[in-house]
Image: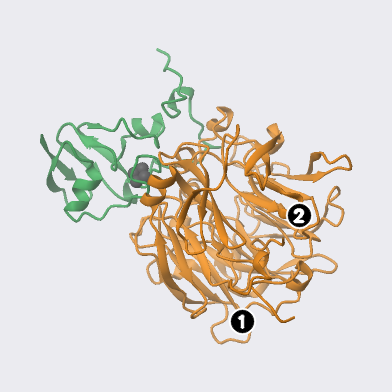
Amino acid sequence: MAYTVTISNRDNVRYQVDGKRSLLDSLRDRAVDLPYGCKYGGCITCAAKLTVGEVDQRRQVALNNRQINDGYVILCVARPTSDITIEIGVESHDKLYRNPFLDPLKPYELKADIAAPKEA
Amino acid sequence: MECCGPGYSSPADAVKAPQEKLLYTIAIYTGTGIQKPDYLATVDVDPDSSTYSQVIHRLEMPGIGDELHHMGWNACSSCFEDTSMARKYLLLPGVRSNNIHIIDTATDPRAPRLHKVVDGNEIKSKTNLSGPHTVHCLGSEIIISMLGNAKGEAPGGYLYLNKDFEILGRWENSMGDIKFGYDFWYQPRHNVMVSSEWAAPNTFMPGFDLEEVGHLKYGREIHFWDFEKKVPIETMYLGEDGLLPLEVKFHHDPDSTHGFCGAALSSNVIHWWKDNSEKWQWEKIIDVENEPHPEWPIPVPGVMSAILVSMDDKYLYLNNWLHGDMRQYDISDPHNPVLTGQVWMGGLLGKAPEVNGVKVAGGPQMFQLSLDGKRLYVTTSLFSTWDNQFYPEIREQGGIMIMIDCDPVSGGMTINPDFIVDFGQEPNGPSRCHEARYPGGDCTSDIWL
Ligand code: FES
């Protein structure tokens, strides 16, 4: 399945990408300059912000639930499952990093493997 | 003496080495938003040179996104009697990429060149390891602590390379019940290695979630190994006194059993030694109190991310990355350290926002001491994602390197007014410097057999 990826902070440039490949691979093949490190979804270097649409990023282990709720996606493992709009690079990282002493996570905002269920 | 291999015959001999003229530090763009490779910077530290206190050469790595961090030599004083060995290559692991860059610093010490890259994917496929950290050489071989398996899960293990930098496999015969890896140091005369614990790469690389400490995702133990058998034999549970036990150092004196560990989050120094009945003991000898902050609901911990023991084993240096101070303790009696020096640079407490006319982003973090114990070079960045959390302004300002004049006789430290390297002014934009080493070996590289 092919989907359209729009990069909102690069003049809304659009690319058609394959839903079976990671967004990092697809976009780098089209010469989009993207940061990356581990390439297995563990180090957060490649994080981008998803503003429209859906991705499958079940393989990522870098993000906590707050970061996921804020729209972050890990491009090295995420595959689009619809047309999407993303913001890339450090400009999109405004909410990615927080001082852990000043702004603690709630139990349900931890990483998936240790998060408590959100109370209703 | 007519031998000799690399290094010095003894720590006392090392103290007498000529003054360092060059220093290498890694500088990163990973995580900064600048799409350039990390690099090895050569800094001129010769006070008589016209380029003193400047970066005089930059060796870029072949790829981007490595996150260079710590580094180590191919050979040290443990090969002093082996004339076939030379301290020629500096190993620069990329924590994120897993690549290990082998840098030839001998052909032209001012302009190091890339000799070889041990490919990160090959390391993963041959050893199931990732997240390289500390590099030590063992005679003619090299071991590197690796903090995770190929998927970034703890505990990882130790990568074993031969002197031609070929992968021999894993060094250890067992990781026992060890949960995490980080730093290690060994004392061959006592057949002991001590290793410490940070966290799994998948835990620490994305940044620091404080709550994960309570969920036991970060370490609080140190481990004693049978060095020859390559198996851990005893664990010290440090508990709340030893949260995030990071750097471990033995005395340089090869006969000593005394060693030290800096527990970063607890901001304590742990001391260990072997008692008269041949049992390993430990105690907390330094406890840096958390400090109140005008805007914080809780007091700020020091975050002691590094420690260093002077070549004569007289002084221990430590940093408090969030407070902003560097300290010197006289550890002549290792059970009773005495604070003999303290200086401030950066930090969150606002005590020294500027040093030598440069605004400091970050706090004192990594440091290297001259062999004679007189000059301590200090940098400010910890790890890209953690920098971004605690000191977001480092993105625009970059890291700095300063020098502290230390009195190795009666103690005391002062920031040298003539030395500062501002990595905020680098040609490709602000970068962040971290660990530093000298061409001739330094206070955190050499071990004596
Ligand atoms: S490159 Fe490490 S999480 Fe994507």
For residue A116, which numbered disc appears in the image?
Answer: none
Q: Colour of chain B?
A: orange
The kind of residue tagged 1 is Asp
Q: Which residue is mark 2?
A: B189
The residue at 57%/32% (across/down) is B213
The residue at 60%/36% (across/down) is B219
Q: Colour of chain A?
A: green
Q: What chain is tagged by disc 2? A: B
Residue B48, quarter of picture: bottom right
Residue B253, quarter of picture: bottom right
Question: Which residue extends farthest top?
Answer: A120
Residue count near mark 2 (Cα–Cα under 10 Å), binned few <14, some 14–19, many ≥20: few
Drawn side of residue B414 relative to residue A53, left or right: right
Q: Which residue is mark 1?
A: B46
Of residue A55 and residue B180, the one placed in the foreground of this image is B180
The residue at 72%/53% (across/down) is B187
Figure quadrant, ligand 1: top left
The kind of residue tagged 2 is Arg
